[in-house]
Amino acid sequence: MADRKSDDIDEPEENGPVQKNTGTTVRFNKKIDILSNKPLPAYDHGPVKAYQAEGKGKLPQKLIA
């Protein structure tokens, strides 16, 4: 893994958690951010929890993960 500078925290080179001002976001393929601080309890199914997600580029901006 390449060395990261503190300025790179919002734009990681790989998938994984990204620390943002409001909580932790998990990024997949630089195109989908799952916002762990924005749960969607209406979509929960037992132990499986749903969260708001954001698409980048050609993906829809509002997603559910």
Image (cartoon, rainbow, N blue to C red):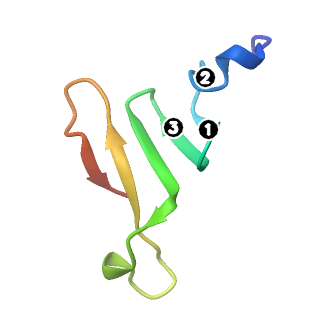
Q: Earlier in the sequence, mark 3 or mark 1?
A: 1
Residue at the (26%, 23%) spot, across then down: 57
Q: Is residue 30 above or below residue 26?
A: above
Q: Tell me the SS state at disc 2.
A: loop
Q: Amino acid at mark 1?
A: Gly
Q: Position of residue 3 (x, y in %)?
A: 80, 11
The residue type indicated by label 2 comes to: Pro
Q: Are marks 2 and 1 in contact (CB under 8 Å)?
A: yes
| Residue in front for this viewpoint, 15 or 5 | 5
Identify which residue, 38 or 13, lies in the foreground: 38
Residue 33: x percent and y percent? 44, 41
Assign the C terminus to one quadrant of the image: bottom left
Residue visible at 60% across and 18% down in the picture:
13
User: Closer to the N terminus: mark 3 or mark 2?
Assistant: 2
- Quarter holding residue 59: top left
Disc 3 and disc 2 in contact, CB within 8 angstroms: yes
Image spot of residue 5 (x, y percent) = 77, 13
Q: Are marks 3 and 1 in contact (CB under 8 Å)?
A: yes
Task: Give me the C-alpha separation between circle 2 and circle 1.
Answer: 8 Å
Q: Amino acid at mark 3?
A: Arg
Q: Which residue is mark 3?
A: 27
Q: Quadrant of residue 31?
A: top left
Q: Secondary structure at mark 1?
A: strand
What distance separates the C-alpha of mark 3 from that of mark 2?
Answer: 8 Å
Q: Tell me which residue sits at (51%, 37%) in the image.
A: 27
> Compared to 64, does 61 lie above or below?
above
Q: Residues within 10 Å of mark 1 (few under 14, many from 20)?
A: some
- In the image, which disc is placed on residue 16? 1
Give me the C-alpha separation between circle 3 and circle 1: 5 Å
